[in-house]
Image (cartoon, rainbow, N blue to C red):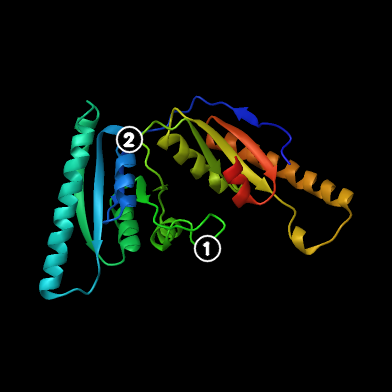
Amino acid sequence: MCRSAGRLYTSSVRSDPFAHIAVGIDISTGSRLALERALTLPMSAKATVTLLRAIPEGIGGDLNRHAREFAKNMLAKDAQNARALLDRSAAGKKVTLATQITEGDSALTLVAFAAENNVELIVIGRTGHRSISGSSMIGMTAQKILRRSAVPVLVVRAQSTVEWKHLVAAVDVSLDSTAALTAAARIAPKAKITAFAAASVPYEEFVELPRETMELLRDQYLDKAEEQLAALVAKSGISAEAVARNGDPRALVLEQ
């Protein structure tokens, strides 16, 4: 159920461009797409984009040397291609490209680097192949980064370098979710942003009630979700359309 197309909240708050973006690099197509998208994001005049490649921990002797040499060459090639893309614009020419080889778990080392180097956004590629209703939507490494990162994470799943026109920020209506709206506004400051929340009656699938009673409960929980969503958007200071609907959040966010 969705009573309206949504309520629009406007604000004069401006979103700051990114000063430091970290991109996880491996040999997959996903990481190449992630890098291409990262280079199109709003960045400050003296921004830094760091390309990170992790090698397994515990490799010793000549194998360690060869692994580092391979990673170094791969990062150099990616940095060269990135430099060519950035130099197409005057703003891009001012962006600094850096490379970093880490040793250990690729997710944990990327999260640690971000925390220790004032990274404002992590960009990674999508490697999973199951549907959003399955157990692996974006790959185990990406899931680990999303769970552990203290900074926003952008997962790129398809090739596209065009400017985004509409972003949907799926939130849980807790005030902590303002970070999702802030990140969306920074990633695409010119885009329309929809703050979307799903409402549902707790344990609805485990109870059997008259249809009229269940509909009344759904309306009550939807009213509460709309009220909480309005407070969330207002606190964020971001211009956004607020939309709340009844149902399964996984399916609804794709429909939205």
User: Could you tell whether 216 is left or right of 148 in the image?
Assistant: right
Three-letter amino acid code at disc 2?
Thr
Measured along the vertical axis of the image, is residue 18 above or below residue 140?
above
Residue 88, relative to residue 179: is it above or below?
A: above
User: Could you tell me which residue is drawn at 23 percent across and 35 percent down?
Assistant: 85
Front-most of 178 and 109?
A: 109
Residue drawn at 30 percent across, 55 percent down: 28
Tally of numbered discs: 2
Q: Amino acid at mark 1?
A: Ser
**Residue 136: image location, x then y, percent:** 48, 61
Q: Which residue in the protein does label 1 denote?
A: 135
Asked if the residues shown at circle 1 and circle 2 are in contact, with their CB atoms under 8 angstroms apart, the answer is no
59 left or right of 39 in image: left
Label 1's element? loop
- Please state the horizontal and vertical placement of residue 98, each as a whole percent of the image: 19, 46
Residue 230 located left or right of residue 99: right
